[in-house]
Image (cartoon, rainbow, N blue to C red):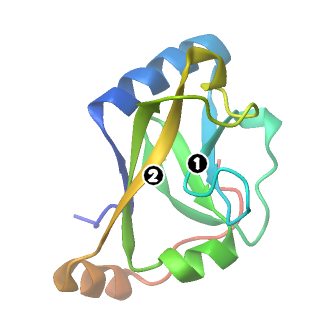
Amino acid sequence: MPVPRVEVTPAAQALLHKMQGLHGPLLFHQSGGCCDGSAPMCFPRGDFRVGQEDVYLGEVVGTPFYMSGSQFEYWRHTHLTVDVVPGRGSGFSVEAPEGVRFLIRSRLFTDDEYRALEAEGPPSKGPQH
């Protein structure tokens, strides 16, 4: 079984289901920009254009998760967990009006996980969906 690069907490899963009901299919994008640092942005799938250098990390709750290529170079050794916390996030992310925001929690991959990921080869780049 492949090692997941990204997963979600039960709270984030519940919020994603709610947001999918309101907005339809979604996608996450984690950039390396200055704004909202470790907060992944969640968009209706047709409202964000995935670039050819964006790295596809996997899918959570039917929602593809991408990271900018330059950010992935820093985070390639890191397992990501999408969580949700109270507070106002970015006005562009779909959860903003809910009074909560998605947040990334991270940990380093174990040596065994990292070896397994290296054996799989690099993750795909560009739009996958």
Q: Residue at x 37, y 80 (%)?
A: 120
Mark 1: amino acid? Pro
Q: Which residue is mark 2?
A: 104
Q: Which residue is mark 1?
A: 40
For mark 1, give the secondary structure: loop
**Where 17 sits versus 21, above or below?**
below
Mark number displayed over residue 26: none
For residue 60, side relative to residue 52 (left or right): left
> Residue 88 in the image: x percent, y percent?
60, 29
**How many callouts does the rendering have?**
2
**Where 97 sits versus 57, above or below?**
above
For residue 92, side relative to residue 74 (left or right): right
Q: How would you rate the neighbour count of disc 1 (Cα within 10 Å): few for under 14, some for 14-19, many for 20 or more?
A: many
> Residue 118 in the image: x percent, y percent?
36, 87
Residue sitting nearer the eye, 49 or 85 = 85
The residues bearing labels 2 and 1 have C-alpha atoms spaced at a distance of: 7 Å
**Where 52 sits versus 110, above or below?**
above
Residue sitting nearer the eye, 51 or 100 = 100
Mark 2: amino acid? Ile
Task: Residue at the far top: name it.
Answer: 22
Task: Residue at the far front: name it.
Answer: 87
Q: Residue at x 66, y 26 (%)?
A: 94
To which quarter of the image does residue 31 belong?
bottom right
Q: Residue at x 65, y 50 (%)?
A: 36
> Residue 117 in the image: x percent, y percent?
34, 79
Q: Quadrant of the N terminus?
A: bottom left
For mark 2, give the secondary structure: strand
Q: Are marks 2 and 1 in contact (CB under 8 Å)?
A: yes
**Marks 2 and 1, the one that precedes in the sequence:** 1
